[in-house]
Amino acid sequence: MENQIKYSQTNEDSKLNITKVGPKTSLLFFRIISFFLVFLIWELAGRSDISIAFPPFSKVFLAFIEMILSGEFVEAYADSLPPLLIGLLITVVGGVIIGVSVGLVRSAEWFIMPLLIIFQTAPVSALIPMLTYIYGISDTSKIVAIVILGMPLVALNSYKGIQSTNPSLLEMSASFLASRTNTIIFVILPSAQKMIFAGLRLGISGAFIGIVLAELLITPTGIGDLITYNRFIARYDKMFATIVSILAIAGLTLSLMRVFEDWLFPKEKN
Amino acid sequence: MKKRSRSTEVILSTDSINVVYQESLIALQNVSLDIPAAKLTAILGPSGCGKTTLLKVIAGLIKPTSGSVKVRGKEIEGPGPDRALVFQDFALLPWATVLQNVGFGLRARGVPKKERDETSLHYIKEVGLLGFEDKYPHQLSGGMRQRTGLARALTINSDILLMDEPFSAVDEQMRRKLQEDLLNLLKVENKTVIFVTHSIEEAVYLADQVIILSGRPGSVAEIVYPKIDRTGEIDLIRRQPGYIDLVDEIWSSLKKYVE
Amino acid sequence: MQKSPFWSLIFWAGVWEFVGQMQWMTLLPPLSGIWFAFAELFQQSAFWDAFIMTARTFGIGLSLSIVVGIPIGILMGISSRADKILSVWVNLFLSAPITAVIPALMPILGIADATVIATVILFSIWVVIIDTQAGVTHVKDSLVEMGKIFGCSRSKIIFWIVIPSAMPEIITGIRLSVVRAVKGVIVGQIVIALIGFGGLFSTYLSYFLMERFWALIIVVFIMSFTIIGLVEMLERRIAFYAKSR
């Protein structure tokens, strides 16, 4: 008949050549190709006459090195990192505490859930310019910006994680007369772990958006200022280098988070 | 009946099949079988013995590491229209109605819609699903879903029907009903059936030939030919003297492979 | 929940009203005062211009994200090579602070629709790709085998089985991308600060028209909430087949 499906497609390890992560070496090989391709396309696009505001990769790379050596990055990140770290800490700790307590306590749920949902959907970023009027051009403004953009995500996910505990595990715990504390520690929190960490990743990414927004909109310091300033003086290579640096730091932070999660809760073999 | 008579024509054979996963895990070892035409052959074995792997090799979904499968003496090169498969988890398209699901095989062959629907309705009626052709799988019970899967396999009119633990996902009473219906259906349809099961009772109840696979690696431990008369009342099959004895006999030889 | 969340909202509205009436912060007028600002807002042509501009850029950006994102996701789902090459970037941009990229877009694309559209795309496309890919990779093996058994070609398996099967994930991806596109269209306009709602927000704030500022926040909130609610409804309508897979 017309089914000339070749055996190569019917091997046991591929249904439709859908293969999960292959051997490590080949993955590394593809990573290198992937980076090379993107940089190549960037270089070519930058060299063509799209816009003078879009420099090729090589220029941006050189600007990046220059900015590391000249201390421009050091100076900018010295302004941006402290509020970012404090904001992240508040986001993570506060978000998990709020989310978990909202998930565990009925009245807290009634009280706080609508607020969380509103904060998640509302155009919170529009509030950020307002922060200057309250806190002035200060680190506090940045921290508040980070927290209002990041914390609702962490709290909502922690809440969902707590809510999604398998009911039969709860019944099991109740039938063995476990105390509320034991149930929370041994049943509820472990089963919420995945969702909580997913929320932390969302929250961290929200926090980075918060600091960048704050520095672009209200407090002309740090990384945001470095971006705005270099755009103003038309040093587009330096502007792109700065943007790349903040994207890279955000990416790195999130990867570290993943490594930390895997270290804390080793994946079960399935 | 004539169609269940003891002809010895071999319709499908496997020749020393070996399946090795990842160079170390041997799933099947040296499996050579002859499947008689118009008979029901059951493949029985403990879980993890490779019985589903064997069926998928026969279906052409898994290429054996070595060895071959022949249908009427001709080596297979993959799935083919001479073999239809009924799946353990039904494998119905959840977004398609019973009629569309049953007609899937015909659609894949480019049969025009009118003819496709006619054929599909014929088999929907034969498996007892008339009136449900516009329902979706999620509106059906497990038994009805498997009837849909069976009807779909019948539409392409292949001589060989492969069934992968077809009744294991339904409850005990439904399973009995489906077993009876399968026997009745085979009185009408002239099919060679290869049937994977983990139930000894099911194998003895249905099969003319029971192939017992040993545990890992899966290889043929024994072949039993139940002397059960299925020509008469279906209700009487389990009352035949040989039935219980054979179930016990198979269990005592299978026991050593379990765990 | 024993009590309706509606009463919780009323409670918080009460808190807002109280804080506003106390006049602790000039930035937070009482809620009751904002009611009148709605009427003022809707009478302004600047509001409707901003509304149309926002709707247009949101619509174009989101459609492009979906139309481009789904094929890329499918490609990454069926080809491990495409997956290995693209996944680093998709995952990076999925959670990157895209906000930082907006200043770079402005000199390239100009202070107009194009920059906002690009922001919307950069905010919303990655989640479409990721979810589509997840849907495609999680197709049940038995359905693909069923296609092979009945002699389907590779393209028939992809179009008849794999893509329809991935629909629930694709719809989820679209819902999440709508949420992100809403954020993108607002953030984009706010960073540019001259056009659309972003322009209005900064005007109201610099002239201390706080009633209008909050009224606009509430209007934008209600619009986002409605759009997201509509997509959720659509998602629920096809949820049945996600369950029966």
Image (tube, coloured by chain):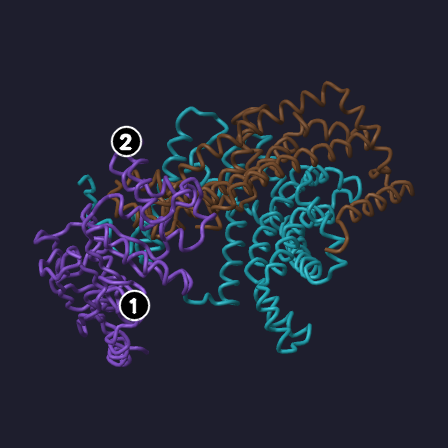
Chain colours: A cyan, B purple, C brown
Front one among C199 and B241:
B241
Number of labels in the image equals 2
Question: In the rendered image, which residue does mark 1 sit on?
Answer: B236
Badge 2 and badge 1 both on one subunit: yes
The quarter holding residue C114 reads top right
Residue A65 seen in the figure: no
Is residue B215 or residue C175 the one in the foreground? B215
Q: Earlier in the sequence, mark 2 or mark 1?
A: 2
Q: Quadrant of residue C115?
A: top right
Foreground: disc 2 or disc 1: 1
Image: A35 above or below C197: below
Residue B14 percent across, percent down from the top left:
13, 61
Q: Is residue B165 left or right of residue C71?
A: left
Q: Which mark is residue B112?
A: 2
Residue A121 — which label?
A: none
**Residue type, numbered disc 1:** Leu
Q: Check the residue under mark 1 and report the chain it is in.
A: B
Q: CA distance from mark 2 to mark 1?
A: 44 Å
Q: Is there a contact, CB below 8 Å, between mark 2 and mark 1?
A: no
Q: As rendered, which of C55 and A238 lies closer to the eye?
A: C55
Q: Residue at x 54, y 41 (%)?
A: C235
